[in-house]
Image (cartoon, helix red, strand yellow):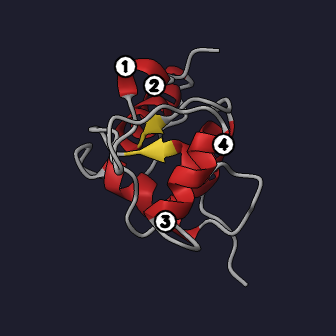
Amino acid sequence: MTSNTDFQNQVYQFVGKVPGGKVTTYGEVAYLIQNSKIKNQNYNSKVQINPRFLPRLVGFCLHQNKDPKVPCHRVVDRNGRLAPNFAFDGAKEQKRRLEAEGVKFVDEMHVDLAKSLWQGKS
């Protein structure tokens, strides 16, 4: 069994802070991680990743997650679109979980970001 990378652990940590009834975006998670590393002066990775790729990397990490305590269903794309490849029953399961928490939708595949977006502030 392989262990998580530092970046994966940070993704899971940030996603774990998203409160029920709210969602965040892959880009927001990437932004928060990148800024926390810069603020804490511990961004000493030898690998430079194009910042435009970081939201996709966040999505990849969430797709790899095996911990049911990490609320991956609370992360959507920048347009509020659900993940078509969400675990179990795809976007249908992600929507079911979000609706159970009170998240509002504008259509079958898009969360109402104006009402439900959480941007890392408690």
| Residue that mark 1 sits on | 114
32 in relation to 110, above or below: above
Amino acid found under the numbered disc labelled 3: Phe
Q: Residue at x 37, y 65 (%)?
A: 84
Residue type of the residue flagged with mark 2: Leu
Label 2 belongs to which residue? 117
Label 1 Cα neighbours within 10 Å, binned few <14 / some 14-19 / many ≥20 = few
Q: Nearer the viewer, mark 3 or mark 4?
A: 4
Tell me which numbered mark, 3 or 4, is placed earlier along the sequence.
3
Q: Does dot 1 land on a helix, a strand or a loop?
A: helix
Give the Cα distance between marks 3 and 4. 16 Å
The three-letter amino acid code for the residue at tag 4 is Ala
Separation of disc 4 and disc 2 at Cα? Answer: 16 Å
Kindly indicate the quadrant of the structure image that contains residue 14.
Answer: top right
In the image, which is nearer the foreground, mark 4 or mark 1? Answer: 4
Which residue is situated farthest in the top direction here?
A: 122
| Closer to the eye: label 1 or 2 | 1
Residue that extends furthest to the front in the rendered view of this protein: 107
Dot placed on the residue nearer the N-terminal end, 4 or 1: 4
Tell me the element at label 3. Answer: loop
Q: Where is mark 4, residue-wise?
A: 100
Q: Which residue is mark 3?
A: 86
Mark 4 vs 2, N-terminal side = 4
Mark 4 Cα within 10 Å, few/some/many (few <14, many 20+)? few
Spot occupied by residue 15 in the image (x, y as percentages of width and height): 60, 41
- In depth, the one of 106 and 42 nearer the eye is 106
Query: Could you say where residue 44 lies in the image, as x and y percent from the top left?
Result: 47, 43
At horizontal 32% and vertical 42% (from top left) the residue drawn is 107
How far is mark 3 from mark 1, CA to CA?
23 Å
